[in-house]
Image (spheres, rainbow, N blue to C red):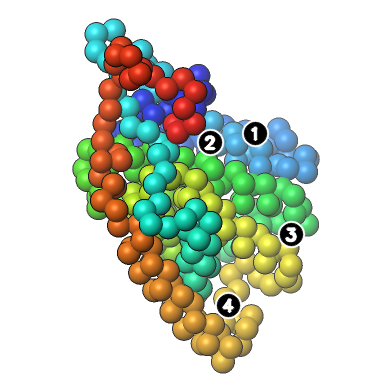
């Protein structure tokens, strides 16, 4: 059922995306919570709990995709999850610019979290999730599992489906809003929404889900590495407190310049007019050479 090639046959509408959110919040949290109790003494408890939380929504997606891929009367319709095109940019420069943009965006948006006091229960949850005493579990859950699962859910499925139904702007905004919502705390929601908009824009411009996973990895891995390197720093400690105001001011404006330059470069180099056509709904046929791509790596 979890064959990745089938996922392209399910592209949820906005209302169906909210069904996925409910499944994730209600059933996923329940399964993940029970799993945490059962494996609480294992060294990768956070990672196992995260995987279990993600099973219900992806099981639902897989079931819907399998059903859509085997209709009785008409050819199955699909929108590929991954169909990369990078305009005038090479692959290596593209990913380098993405990494710089994500680092810069993290610094530029950091004051938004500093303005919002972190409630004690959220701080405790962050300390559990970002436990520097369990570096393997921390890296696995935040830098590997979260980028893959959340980008496949929010961009690869929800945004792809909403884009077909509602258009690009609504698809980017709604998928970013849902992405922020499923983080379950206002302290992280605003930066997550901004990151989600950027990830969605890149997904639309390139139709490359791996670009979104890479950006999410860079963002989360940076946080995880800083947590491991500076375990004495609090989870809600700001960059300005760590650097000092003078150094932070210089770093902040340098990051703002880098971010603007990266966005401008991406806008100019990726503007190849392939975006809309890339996400058009396609149909399987029985014509020679146009059947299902059984071995196609682009899902």
Q: Earlier in the sequence, mark 3 or mark 1?
A: 1
Point 73% across, 42% down: residue: 44
Task: Pinpoint residue 45: horizontal percent, then vertical percent.
Answer: 71, 42
Task: Pinpoint residue 246: horizontal percent, then vertical percent.
Answer: 56, 92
**In this image, 15 relative to 61: left or right?**
left
What residue did someone put label 1 on? 35
Let me know if residue 232 appears in the view.
Answer: yes
Q: Residues within 10 Å of mark 1 (few under 14, many from 20)?
A: some
- Which structural element holds mark 1? helix
Q: CA distance from mark 4 to mark 2?
A: 32 Å
Q: Quadrant of residue 247?
A: bottom right
What residue did someone put label 2 on? 54
Instruction: Looking at the picture, tell me which residue is in the foreground, 127 or 111.
Output: 111
Determine which of the numbered discs, if any, sits on residue 132 in the image: 3
Task: Pinpoint residue 94: horizontal percent, then vertical percent.
Answer: 47, 58
- Which structural element holds mark 4? helix
């Amino acid at each position: 059922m979890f064959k990745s090639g089938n996922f392209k046959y399910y592209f949820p509408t906005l209302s169906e995306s909210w069904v996925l959110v409910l499944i994730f919040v209600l059933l996923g949290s329940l399964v993940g919570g029970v799993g945490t109790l059962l494996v609480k003494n294992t060294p990768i408890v956070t990672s196992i709990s995260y995987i279990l939380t993600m099973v219900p929504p992806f099981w639902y997606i897989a079931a819907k995709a399998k059903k859509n891929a085997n209709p009785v009367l008409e050819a199955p319709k699909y929108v590929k999850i991954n169909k990369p095109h990078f305009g005038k940019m090479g692959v290596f420069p593209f990913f380098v610019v993405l990494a710089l943009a994500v680092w810069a965006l993290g610094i530029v948006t950091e004051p938004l979290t500093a303005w919002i006091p972190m409630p004690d229960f959220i701080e405790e949850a962050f300390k559990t999730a970002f436990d520097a005493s369990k570096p393997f579990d921390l890296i696995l859950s935040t830098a590997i599992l979260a980028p893959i699962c959340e980008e496949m859910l929010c961009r690869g499925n929800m945004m792809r489906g909403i884009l077909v139904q509602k258009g690009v702007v609504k698809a980017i905004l709604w998928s970013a809003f849902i992405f922020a919502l499923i983080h379950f705390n206002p302290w992280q929601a605003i930066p997550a929404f901004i990151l989600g908009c950027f990830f969605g824009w890149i997904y639309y411009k390139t139709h490359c889900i791996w670009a979104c996973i890479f950006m999410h990895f860079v963002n989360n891995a940076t946080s995880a590495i800083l947590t491991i390197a500076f375990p004495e720093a609090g989870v809600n400690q700001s960059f300005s407190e760590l650097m000092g105001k003078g150094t932070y001011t210089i770093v902040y404006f340098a990051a703002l310049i880098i971010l603007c330059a990266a966005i401008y470069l991406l806008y100019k180099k990726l503007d190849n007019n392939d975006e809309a056509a890339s996400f058009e709904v396609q149909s399987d046929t029985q014509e020679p050479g146009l059947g299902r791509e059984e071995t196609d790596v682009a899902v």
